[in-house]
Image: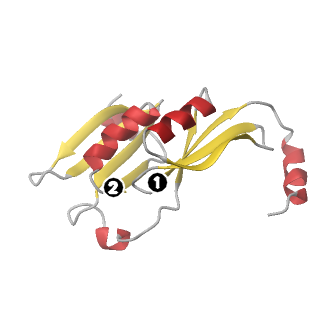
Amino acid sequence: MTDNQANKQSVIAHLVCDNAAEALSYYCETFGGREAMRLTDKQGHLAHGCFFIGDSAVFICDDYAGCQDNQALQNAVSRITLHLNVEDVDAAFDKAVSAGCEPVMAPEDMFWGDRYAKVRDRWGHEWAMARTVREVDPASLQDTLDKMTF
């Protein structure tokens, strides 16, 4: 797939990272992505990168004055979680942790029917991994949630 094919998606996550070139390679290796584009400016910053996980594109660029509004990003915490549908949640989680991700939530079977886990990469982005392991009646989900205490 090419970067142009990504433009057919309705929503595309656009990650801003320090050393985005390293992050691009890391994400492809760790999460099974395929690099589609890498554009570097004269100063060596990754001005635009694109990779695919499955048929979903993710854009990426360096955090610098020529890209985005980097002043707003200083000391920011990402409140976005990228959700990956995977064949084997436990294997994907173990691979991510082995590659340096911080465990946020170990693999667990959830009330909504998915096996689910979450990690945080060294750039502060969270990645959830999920696989449906059982079908759950949608009407029962609210009842289950109402009975839970947090």
Q: Residue at x 62, y 32 (%)?
A: 90
Q: Position of residue 125 (x, y in %)?
A: 46, 54
Q: Position of residue 63 (x, y in %)?
A: 28, 60
What residue is shown with label 2? Answer: 17
Name the residue nearer the viewer: 11 or 67: 67
Q: Horizontal placement of 44 versus 35: left or right?
A: left
Q: Horizontal placement of 114 versus 23: left or right?
A: right
What residue is shown with label 1? Answer: 125
Q: Secondary structure at mark 1?
A: loop
Q: Residue at x 35, y 71 (%)?
A: 74
The answer, for residue 50, to whether it is visible in the render is no
Mark 1 surroundings within 10 Å by alpha-carbon count, few (fewer than 14), some (14 through 19), many (20 or more): some
Q: Residue at x 72, y 37 (%)?
A: 114
What amino acid is found at the position of numbered circle 1 in the picture? His
Q: Give residue 39's quadrant in the image.
A: top left
What's the mark number on residue 69? none
Q: Residue at x 41, y 43 (%)?
A: 58
What amino acid is found at the position of numbered circle 2 in the picture? Cys
Name the residue nearer the viewer: 23 or 68: 23
Q: Secondary structure at mark 2?
A: strand
Q: Horizontal placement of 81 versus 23: left or right?
A: right
